[in-house]
Structures are given as structure tokens and as C-alpha cells.
Image (cartoon, grey):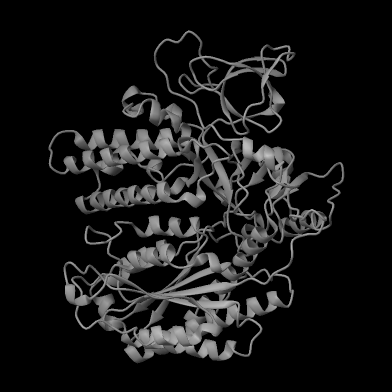
């Protein structure tokens, strides 16, 4: 099987929008005039010379994308481009894929595992059950015994791994085949999906050595990083951070977890070129150190102090501090990854920012690297009065947004610096205690405890922080177990799922739904580079609109919405026709129609843009600039591109979340 994996690669050549005459044209999707049918090959696919299936031409690479040209019984004539077919493949060896959207499992933070139902009626019955929670648990219990022995009439045919998450090493594809919106107003969509994974062992099983033994149990290590604003006003919190680390080390010295919890510290200030006396933009105070290296960390902490000069702006370069924490620390030494961020000011997001990344882009960067960030935001009378608190709150809620759409954000009330420091100590002490307890129990062999999600009347900062730490700590344990045991996704050719946790909707119907999957688009390196350049051009058009009295606003909107539609429906068309404008061609609506999810910009109407204030339009453009910087980081991120054995980097693919596409 490993040899098989080394030989397969991905060719993402999705449908093309072609408006000229062709000698041979793929089949159109039903009701469409410009959108072609396509499918991806399953691992068992064989390309034959003719519809009789007697002469084998080749075994295509898994996930090869095909246009569909003709259907005869169980045989389909296919081609990798819209310019002609190559041969025939059995229909049951193809997974039809109407758009480029694939789903990704969210982190399990108190939610139930995803259940795959055999048909639409089965999942509808679940959604209308008198006791969704009890029925869900009943089906989940079926997958707790190994091997799984499902009844012949079971409406559930597969489940997401229960006590772990899919290993980061095991790429899977969860394409959306169809959707049903009958429960949309209740907070969920029903999706028809496949789950394609070449895998290295049976789904949900542990990796074994050549003697048949499962992987050796090992204890999880956890890295906690303090990313600290070290400007003048932050001295009480700098001192409190030092004190917390020292006290935690004192407690860990007699704990089983003493070698399994490490601390690191990163400091940030602001743009040094504008104020050289501020000394640094960011500073790696210390990489990860545990109790055994306490003396080294103590010596480094002694050098951590507040600035002696004011920075150029009330906002500080917070995003640069977080990015350096992600890029420059030894995360490969730890399993659980947590950042505790602390500041009393908002983040720089203008041209004085070193990274030019937005909070939204950095949040995605954190999720890509499987790092959880909790934002501890100091609330003072000064930042409330000058309006900075509201600005910073919005950004830090975005920065700390988890894959379940909840924010890991805690307000530190500071009517005086002394009270602020005391509240900060309470919060960070509680967080350290939760993570220590989790690691100690894991060392003892205890099963990860799913955090309670019931409404809690205690909304004090330390109680909120404790709940966040329990959620992220649980998710880190499942990530660790999945990576340790190399857990794969389930193998499903055709099934239906709900995109939200139905049990939580049942318990708290007024709450926002908790997603169990989120949409992403597979992009090749070539497509990502084309997208980046096109968004740059769109930004230039928008900035020109500020200086023009003609219809530049409308031109900008057309370019923007066209690029967004191509990404969701057909990424390959960006490469083939990068300047093609679907809005002007009059086919945009049919391209957008039927998409199960839309990016933020796809929901933007022409009048919405034209009626925005100048400030709102500038914020919109600033967001696009942040996305361009994020795409540049994707391009450099060698660890998350999936090659499937091909040496051609242009064919490598990246799962880009839909929310960070235009």
C-alpha cells in the first residue's frame, strides 16, 4: 500500500468555462449552459479504451479530475480537459463532483463525532427525532467495539473517529455532491458527500508494526507560549507572566507532568523604524523550556521588561508577535500547542505592520499549524474612552476564532493596573492548572474527558478561561492520539451528513450552530499563484475607484465577484482564463446557483459595495491585502502541501478554507 501511495498524485483540473465552439464538449450540468459535469477517480478506477471495458489503457492516479463526455450504462467517457475525451471509466469508480468545495472536520471540542447516513431519508429522520442526543449516542456506541459490526438495516454506515482526530499525515477528500436545505433555518444543512482516502490502514485503526503490535503509548507533551505586549503600560502583566511561570514550575517540580509541559515567551512592541527607541518589533525571549531547563528560562525572563519609550501608535504590532511565535519556536518538540496572548492595545493592520496580515488571516494560519490561541485582552478606562477597546475586541475575537466558530477570547478587567494584574493572574493560573491536570491524567492512562457544553451561569473571566482551556485541551488530546496512531478518515463512497452538531442544537436551539465540518477548496500551486495575482489586480482596481468618478466601483465589483465564483466552482478556470469576467458575460448567476456554501464576498451585492462609506471600502480592501499575504504564506508552507508522490510542485494541492477566499 505504501508503494501505491508513493505512485499516486493529484491532478486538479476542474471544469472550464468555455464560450467558443468545440469539436467535442463535455456534458453540461443539468439546467446549466456553461457549467460542465465532472468527477474525481476513486482508488479502484481503470481507464478503458472503449465502453465495453475490455481494453485497459491505464490506472489513473487517485483523485484525478475528469470532465464527463458521455454515459452508456455503467460506463462514462471522460477526459482530463474540456478539449477532448481519453477513454472510459466505470461509473462506480468515479465520484461526481458538481463544484470544487470539499469539507474538513472541525476540531472536536465538546461536539459529537460526525455520523454518515446511508441516504437522505435517514439523516432527515435523525433531524426530526424526538431525542436526537439519545439516538446519536446509540449509533456512536455501535462504533466503539472493534471490529464494527453494523446491523444490516442500520441507517448509519460510518462515523468519524471517536477518541481521536484524523492524523495530520493522512490527507482525505470530503467532496460535496449534493445538499438539502430544509433545516437551514434551524442552523444546519444536509450534505451528500463521499469520503475518499487512499489511507495506509483501515479507517479508524491504529498503525501496527511488522509484528502486529499497535503503536507504543506515549505521553502527550504540551507547549504553552506567552505572547506578551511589552510596551510601557504592560509592566504589571509582564511581571505577572514571570511570576506565573515560576509558580507553575514550582508546582510541576513534584508532578508527573514536569517533563511534559514547557513554556516559551515571545515579546512584541511596534514599528522600530518609526521609533528606534522602542528597541525591537518582536523578540523571542525563550524557546520551549521545561522544569529541567528552568535555570535557562529564569535567566531569559530576567531580561524581559517593559519599553522605556513610547511606540508610534496606540496599536501595537501584535500580529507580528503571533507570527514569530508560530514560525520561530520549536513546535516539533511538543504535541499540544497553545498560545496565551496578552495586550491592552489593538493590532496594527496598516502599512506600518511588519507582516501586513489581518487578524482573520493569522487565525487561519494558526489553525493550519494546529495551534490554539487564547486572547487575553486588558480592558482599561483609557482604551475604552479612546475607542480602541472595541476595535481591538473585534480583531482579537477574529484572531482567536476556533474551527467551531467560537472565539477563545477573555477580557481582563483593569479599572486599575493592580486589579488588572490580579485578574490576569487568576485567569492564567486557572489555564495552567487545567492543562497540567489534563497532562497528568493522560500520563496515568485516563481517557480524554469531553468537556461539558451546557450553559454556565458563571461568566467571570477565570470561569470563561477554564472552559476554553478544557475545550482546547480536549481537542489537543484528540489531535495527539490521531497523530500518534496515524488514524485515517472513514472510507465512504456515498453518504449524507449534517454540517452541525444536532445534539447541541437540540440542547440549546437559540445558540449559534456548532459546525462539525467547514468548507474548503482544493487549489494547486499554479492556481494559488494566479489567484494571488488576480486579487492584487482587483485591489489596484478598487484603489483606482477612490480616485475616479466613472463606473470603477462597478468594474471592481464585477472583477471581485467573478474571481470568487471561479474559486468556488472552478479553480482551474483562473489559470485558463485569468482575465475572464463572468459577471460581464452574464453567466455569473448560474455559476453561483446551487453552491452549498459561499465565501464572504459571494454574499456581497453590487449595491452593498457602492453604498459602503469610504472607510468601509478601505477596510474591505485592507482585508483583501491581508488575504494576499496569507496566500504568500501558503506558498511557502511546505509542510501542508499534499503532493501524493508527484515531483511537479505545480500539481501539489492545498486545502484553502472558503472563508479566506475572495
Report x, y in % for residue 95.
64, 30
Report x, y in % for residue 135.
77, 55
138 on left or right of 341? right
Q: For the C terminus, which image quadrant?
A: top left
Visible residue check, residue 196: no
Q: Quadrant of residue 326?
A: bottom left
Q: For the N terminus, which image quadrant?
A: top right
Q: Work out whether 385 lies above or below 572.
A: below
Q: Work out whether 530 lies above or below 581.
A: below
Report x, y in % for residue 71.
65, 15
Report x, y in % for residue 273.
18, 67
Q: Work out whether 51 lies above or below 261.
A: above
Work out whether residue 367 or residue 284 is closer to the camera in this orientation and state it.
Answer: 284
Work out whether residue 31 or residue 66 is closer to the camera in this orientation and state it.
Answer: 66
Visible residue check, residue 105: yes
Q: Outermost residue toward the top?
A: 23
Q: Which residue corresponds to the image point at 55% horizontal and 17% vertical from the top-left?
A: 27
649 on left or right of 496? left
Q: Which residue corresponds to the image point at 67% horizontal and 63% vertical from the top-left?
A: 481
450 on left or right of 527? right
Q: Which residue corresponds to the image point at 51% horizontal and 50% vertical from the top-left?
A: 640
Amino acid at each position: 500500500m505504501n508503494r501505491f501511495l508513493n505512485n499516486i498524485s493529484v491532478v486538479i483540473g476542474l471544469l472550464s468555462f468555455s464560450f467558443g465552439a468545440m469539436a467535442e464538449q463535455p456534458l453540461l450540468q443539468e439546467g446549466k449552459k456553461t457549467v460542465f459535469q465532472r468527477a474525481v477517480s476513486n482508488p479502484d478506477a481503470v481507464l478503458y479504451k472503449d465502453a465495453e471495458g475490455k481494453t485497459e489503457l491505464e490506472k489513473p492516479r487517485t483523485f484525478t479530475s475528469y470532465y464527463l463526455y458521455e454515459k452508456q450504462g455503467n460506463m462514462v467517457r471522460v477526459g482530463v480537459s474540456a478539449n477532448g475525451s481519453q477513454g472510459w471509466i466505470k461509473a462506480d469508480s468515479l465520484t461526481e463532483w458538481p463544484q470544487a468545495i470539499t469539507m474538513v472536520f472541525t476540531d472536536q471540542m465538546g461536539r459529537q463525532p460526525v455520523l454518515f447516513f446511508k441516504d437522505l431519508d435517514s439523516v432527515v429522520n435523525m433531524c426530526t427525532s424526538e431525542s436526537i442526543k439519545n439516538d446519536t449516542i446509540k449509533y456512536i456506541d455501535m462504533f466503539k467495539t472493534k471490529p464494527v459490526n453494523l446491523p444490516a438495516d442500520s441507517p448509519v454506515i460510518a462515523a468519524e473517529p471517536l477518541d481521536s482526530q484524523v492524523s495530520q499525515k493522512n490527507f482525505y477528500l470530503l467532496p460535496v455532491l449534493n445538499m438539502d436545505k430544509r433545516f437551514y433555518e434551524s442552523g444546519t444543512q444536509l450534505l451528500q458527500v463521499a469520503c475518499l482516502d487512499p489511507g495506509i490502514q483501515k479507517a479508524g485503526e491504529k498503525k501496527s508494526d511488522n509484528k502486529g503490535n499497535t503503536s507504543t503509548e506515549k505521553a502527550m507533551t504540551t507547549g504553552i507560549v506567552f505572547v506578551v505586549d511589552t510596551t510601557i503600560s504592560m509592566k504589571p502583566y509582564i511581571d505577572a507572566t514571570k511570576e506565573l511561570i515560576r509558580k507553575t514550575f514550582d508546582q510541576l517540580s513534584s508532578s508527573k507532568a514536569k517533563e511534559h509541559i514547557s513554556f516559551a515567551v515571545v515579546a512584541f512592541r511596534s514599528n522600530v523604524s518609526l521609533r528606534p527607541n522602542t528597541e525591537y518589533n518582536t523578540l523571542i525571549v525563550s524557546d520551549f523550556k521545561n522544569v529541567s531547563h528552568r535555570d535557562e528560562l529564569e535567566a531569559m525572563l530576567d531580561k524581559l521588561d517593559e519599553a522605556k519609550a513610547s511606540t508610534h501608535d496606540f496599536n501595537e504590532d501584535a500580529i507580528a508577535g503571533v507570527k514569530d511565535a508560530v514560525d520561530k519556536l520549536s513546535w516539533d518538540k511538543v504535541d499540544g500547542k497553545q498560545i496565551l496572548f496578552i495586550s491592552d492595545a489593538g493590532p496594527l493592520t496598516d502599512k506600518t505592520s511588519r507582516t501586513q496580515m489581518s487578524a482573520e488571516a493569522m487565525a487561519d494560519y494558526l489553525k493550519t499549524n494546529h495551534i490554539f490561541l487564547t486572547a487575553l485582552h486588558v480592558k482599561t478606562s483609557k482604551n475604552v474612552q479612546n475607542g480602541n477597546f472595541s476595535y481591538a475586541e473585534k480583531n482579537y475575537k477574529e484572531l482567536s476564532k476556533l474551527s467551531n466558530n467560537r472565539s477563545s477570547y477573555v477580557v481582563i478587567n483593569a479599572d486599575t493596573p493592580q486589579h488588572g494584574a490580579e485578574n490576569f493572574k487568576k485567569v492564567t493560573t486557572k489555564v495552567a492548572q487545567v492543562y497540567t491536570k489534563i497532562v497528568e491524567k493522560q500520563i496515568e492512562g485516563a481517557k480524554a474527558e469531553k468537556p461539558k457544553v451546557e450553559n454556565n451561569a458563571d461568566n467571570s473571566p477565570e470561569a470563561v478561561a477554564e472552559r476554553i482551556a478544557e475545550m482546547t485541551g480536549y481537542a489537543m488530546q484528540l489531535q495527539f492520539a490521531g497523530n500518534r496512531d496515524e488514524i485515517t478518515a472513514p472510507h465512504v463512497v456515498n453518504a449524507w451528513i449534517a454540517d452541525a452538531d444536532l445534539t447541541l442544537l437540540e440542547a440549546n436551539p437559540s445558540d449559534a450552530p456548532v459546525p462539525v465540518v467547514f468548507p474548503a477548496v482544493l487549489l494547486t500551486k499554479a492556481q494559488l499563484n494566479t489567484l494571488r495575482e488576480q486579487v492584487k489586480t482587483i485591489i489596484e482596481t478598487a484603489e483606482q475607484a477612490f480616485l475616479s468618478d466613472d463606473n470603477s466601483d462597478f468594474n471592481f465589483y464585477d472583477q471581485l465577484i467573478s474571481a470568487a465564483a471561479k474559486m468556488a466552482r472552478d479553480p482551474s478556470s483562473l489559470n485558463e482564463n485569468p482575465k475572464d469576467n463572468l459577471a460581464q458575460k452574464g453567466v455569473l448567476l448560474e455559476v453561483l446557483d446551487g453552491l452549498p456554501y459561499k465565501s464572504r464576498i459571494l454574499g456581497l451585492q453590487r449595491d452593498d459595495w457602492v453604498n459602503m462609506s469610504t472607510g468601509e471600502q478601505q477596510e474591505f480592501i485592507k482585508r483583501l491585502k491581508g488575504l494576499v499575504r496569507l496566500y504568500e504564506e501558503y506558498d511557502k508552507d511546505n509542510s501542508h502541501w499534499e503532493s501524493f508522490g508527484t515531483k511537479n510542485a505545480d500539481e501539489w494541492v492545498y486545502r484553502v478554507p472558503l472563508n479566506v477566499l475572495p
